[in-house]
Amino acid sequence: MSAIALRPYLPADAPLLAALFRAAIAELTGEDYDTEQQEAWAAKADDAEAFAARLAASLTLVALRGKEVAGFVSLKDNAHIDMLYVAPDAAGTGVAKALCDAAETLAKARGSRKLTVDASDTALGFFQKRGYEPQRRNMVPLADTWLANTDMEKKLGEDDAGPRH
Ligand SMILES: CC(C)(COP(=O)(O)OP(=O)(O)OC[C@H]1O[C@@H](n2cnc3c(N)ncnc32)[C@H](O)[C@@H]1OP(=O)(O)O)[C@@H](O)C(=O)NCCC(=O)NCCS
C-alpha cells in the first residue's frame, strides 16, 4: 500500500471532498446512526457553496494515497477539529491518524494549548484512543431528526517548540 501524503486544501477539491463526506457517512456510520440520521448528516454537503466555504474557513488538509484522495481534516481557529472524514475504501489504514497527527502538530505550533472536537459516535473510540476526553454529550437537531455527538477535549503537550498565547 502506498504511503499517505498530506497537502493543503485547494478550492478545486470541494466537490470531491463533498462526495467523500457523503460516502464516509453512508458507509462508515451505519452501526451508530440510522438511515434518516445519516441522510440528514450527509445533506450538510448539499449546498456546495456553503460546504466549500466551510472547508476554506478552516485549515483543511487533504490526505492522498497515491493519487487517490483518502480523507480530509478541517482545523478551525487552530483549536477545533471541525471535520474529519476518511474514504470508505481507505478506512482502518491510518489515514485519520495521519490527518489528526498533523492537525494537532499545527494547532500546537500555532500556540493552542488544547484541541476540541464534537465527536460522532463512530469516531468516539478513535479520539479516545488519542487522549481526547469526553466533556459533554449532545443531541443536535438536524432536519427532522436528532444526532448524538460528544464534545471532547485534548490538552496539547508542553513539549513543543513555538510560542503560546
Ligand atoms: C472515524 C474515522 C475518521 C476513523 O478513520 P480511520 O482512517 O479508519 O482511522 P485510522 O485507521 O487512522 O485509525 C487509527 C487508530 O484508531 C483506531 N480506531 C479507528 N476508529 C476507531 C473507533 N471507532 N474506535 C476505536 N478505535 C478506533 C484504529 O484501530 C487505529 O488504531 P491503531 O493505531 O492502534 O492501529 C472514520 O471511520 C470516518 O471517517 N468515520 C465517518 C465520519 C466520522 O464519523 N467522522 C468524525 C466526525 S467528528
Image (cartoon, rainbow, N blue to C red):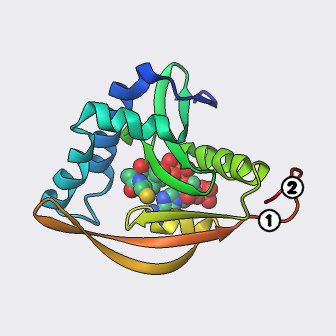
Q: Give the quadrant of the C terminus.
A: bottom right
Does dot 1 land on a helix, a strand or a loop? loop
All told, the count of numbered labels is 2
Q: Quick check: marks 1 and 2 in contact, CB under 8 Å?
A: yes
144, 63: nearer the viewer: 144
Q: Is residue 106 above or below residue 11?
A: below
Q: Position of residue 121 (x, y in %)?
A: 37, 68
Q: Position of residue 111 (x, y in %)?
A: 77, 55
Q: Is residue 33 above or below residue 54?
A: below
Q: Which amino acid lies under the numbered mark 1 shown in the image of this protein? A: Gly
**Would you say 17 lies left or right of 102 here?**
left
Distance from disc 1 to disc 2, alpha carbons, whole Å, reads 7 Å
Residue at the image position 55 percent from the left and 33 percent from the top: 63
Q: Which residue is under mark 1?
A: 157
Count residues near mark 2 (Cα–Cα under 10 Å), then give few for <14, some for 14-19, many for 20+: few
**Would you say 38 lies left or right of 69 here?**
left
- Residue 91: quadrant of the picture: top left
Q: Give the quadrant of the N terminus.
A: top right
Q: Position of residue 11 (x, y in %)?
A: 45, 23
Does dot 2 land on a helix, a strand or a loop? loop
Residue at the image position 55 percent from the left and 21 percent from the top: 66
Q: Which amino acid lies under the numbered mark 2 shown in the image of this protein? A: Asp
**Would you say 128 lies left or right of 55 here?**
right
95, 20: nearer the viewer: 20
Residue 160's label in the rendered image is 2
Q: Position of residue 134 (x, y in %)?
A: 52, 78
Count residues near mark 1 (Cα–Cα under 10 Å), then give few for <14, some for 14-19, many for 20+: few
Residue at the image position 33 percent from the left and 52 percent from the top: 28
